[in-house]
Amino acid sequence: MARVKVAINGYGTIGKRVADAIDAQNDMEIVGVTKTGPSFGCEMAAKKGFDLYCTSDDKDMISSFEDSRFVCKGGLKDLLSKSDVVIDCSPGKMGATNLKKYQEAGVKSIFQGGEKHSLTGLSYTSCANHLENFGAETTRVVSCNTTGLSRTLVPLYDLCGSLKVECTMIRRAADPGDSNKGPINAIKPVLKVPSHHGPDVMTVKPEIEINSLAVAVPTTIMHVHAIIADLPENHGLTTEKILDIWKGTPRVIVMNGQGNRITTTAEVMEMARDIGRKWGDLHEIFVWEDGVRLIGNRLYYFQAIHQESDVIPENVDCVRALMKLEQSWTESVTKTDQAISRYYNI
Ligand SMILES: NC(=O)c1ccc[n+]([C@@H]2O[C@H](COP(=O)([O-])OP(=O)(O)OC[C@H]3O[C@@H](n4cnc5c(N)ncnc54)[C@H](OP(=O)(O)O)[C@@H]3O)[C@@H](O)[C@H]2O)c1
């Protein structure tokens, strides 16, 4: 069967990772990636053998590549003409302009969490609503935080039939490659209350009642979520049973923090570097076993999210949903994750 042709519009933090994850699969291929102009990121595209295009069709922008050592194959229109689906990894809030271009080119599209749900009217997380997205023209893979919340809450909801959740997102201030974001010496509460993160889960699983607060802290590695979830009466669960559910859930890692001496995000990231994925990524959500406790109907837990990478395999599954390659989300997740593991020889 012919491989699905995938374009990456925006080869930055998310785009370069998604490109590798797609490249690892045997049912899809990268037909090109885009940059605004020549920069160090083009080097990696060249090394990988990905064709390079400009994010724009503007002649001056395209010709800015001419004085560089990078070959630009054309503008966005040229790339779209070769593609079945485009994964938009542009900085947030460019979606409306880009969506128009994709629609004009007759190409399916996947946006990221920096765009609002209203842009596409549909959002995506593998474990929550793969089938709802089956054959869709356009959708949005939810943000790293929303993906993280969905990974642990959806299996719990599926078991209990009702969940009321309050959570606090302790957010990294900037990605490691950002030099223009902060705070660098402050703790910054998000003064829009509740924050958008929790309610965004309802775009993929509306049945979960959830609200959140958020605070940015001076770190570049990971977000931590402090979560309180109220289960229904007669839930029949124990702390141990909940841990067992998560241990059997794809893309969730449950580890004892004190026993393994992994009690901070720094150690979680060090463990991720040991695993051997490029960039030291951790696609899985990390749950501290000894930070989980069910008291009556109320569940308390912490989890950590590698913000740059948990959404990466979701984008692959999302291509399978839009292109009708795989109906079962669990089958897609297995295919995606096995292919990525082989790619990095893990
Ligand atoms: N970073 C995270 O932790 C994270 C996590 C989850 C979701 N997201 C979401 O993922 C999306 C991308 O974020 P990012 O962190 O990858 O951003 P980023 O590192 O700033 O990368 C953005 C990329 O888009 C390119 N670009 C600029 N203007 C464009 C345009 N008009 N059309 C297409 N591409 C354009 C940039 O090109 P140049 O390289 O030439 O400047 C760059 O390669 C956002 O929606 C964000 O909210 C980010």
Image (cartoon, helix red, strand yellow):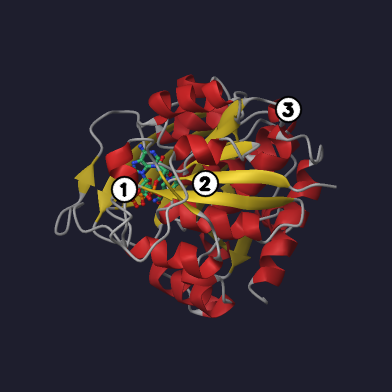
Q: Which residue is mark 2?
A: 8
Relative to 301, residue 135 above or below: above
Is the C terminus in the top left, top right, bottom left or bottom right quadrant?
bottom right
Q: Quadrant of residue 256?
A: bottom right
Q: Residue at x 67, y 64 (%)?
A: 340
Q: Residue at x 49, y 34 (%)?
A: 77
In this rendered view, identify the residue nearer to me: 180 or 29: 29
Q: Quadrant of residue 54?
A: top left
Relative to 194, residue 72 above or below: below
Query: Gap in Å between the C-alphas at discs 3 and 2?
Result: 19 Å
Q: Residue at x 51, y 39 (%)?
A: 78
Query: Gap in Å between the C-alphas at discs 3 and 1?
Result: 37 Å
In this rendered view, identify the residue nearer to me: 181 or 268: 181
Is residue 28 visible from the viewing direction of this image?
A: yes
Q: Which residue is mark 3?
A: 135
Q: For mark 2, give the secondary structure.
A: strand
Q: How many marks?
A: 3
Query: Gap in Å between the C-alphas at discs 1 and 2?
Result: 20 Å
Sequence-wise, the earlier of marks 3 and 1 is 1
Label 3 is placed on what type of residue? Gly
* Residue 240 pos. (x, y %): 69, 57
Label 2 is placed on what type of residue? Ile
* Residue 183 pos. (x, y %): 18, 53
Relative to 29, residue 289 above or below: below
Label 1 is placed on what type of residue? Ser
Q: Ligand 1 closer than 8 Å to the CB at disc 2?
A: no
Point out the residue furthest to the left here: 185
Q: Which residue is mark 1?
A: 63
3 and 2 marks in contact (CB < 8 Å): no
321 relative to 326 in the view: left or right: left
The dot on residue 4 is none
